[in-house]
Amino acid sequence: MKFTIHADGGARGNPGPAGAGAMIRDHLGNSVASVSRFLGTRTNNFAEYEAVILAFETLAKLLKGKTGAVEVAVKMDSELVVKQMKGVYKVKHPTMKAQYARLMHAASAFKSVSFTHVPRAQNSDADALANEAMDRGA
């Protein structure tokens, strides 16, 4: 089984009111779930990580924990998070180290996970969900 996660996070003011959003699609491109959560006052990088973590948690619940044979492609417009997850950039900030660890743990439940940087225009569904979350919390 294969799924694609489009994830995005943002903060207005950075730090400021933050939101995370993600769209989960099956191998045919059909939407199977979405996430949109207000995160309080956070940085945009915290929100970017949180969006993927929430998406993995949502997908694991949807699959009732049967994630061992599932391949997941994560697409996001945060070049920083993608490069950190690929090991190109080091994670230095203590809060981001904790987010990185949480994301690594969530990803470890799946057979394979890949991260790809995409232009913002190709991440519009997740961006809209993140903005909806920020609008709700503001």
Image: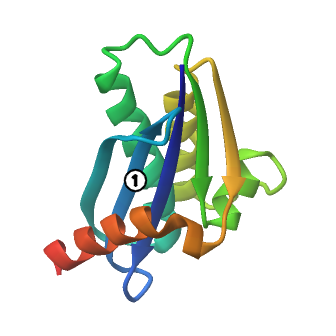
20 left or right, relative to 110:
left
Residue 55 can be seen, yes or no: yes
Give the x, y percent position of residue 117: 70, 60
Give the x, y percent position of residue 74: 59, 45
Q: Secondary structure at mark 1?
A: strand
Return the residue found at the far front.
28
Give the residue displayed 38% in from the left and 31% down from the top: 59
Residue nearest the viewer, comparing 102 with 118: 118
Give the x, y percent position of residue 128: 35, 71
116 left or right, relative to 76:
right
Give the x, y percent position of residue 46: 47, 62
Amino acid beneath label 1: Ala
Return the residue found at the far bottom.
13
Badge 1 local density, few (<14 within 10 Å), some, or many (20+)? many
45 left or right, relative to 47:
right
63 left or right, relative to 71:
left
Give the residue displayed 45% in from the left and 73% down from the top: 43
The residue wearing badge 1 is 22
Picture quadrant where residue 12 is located: bottom left
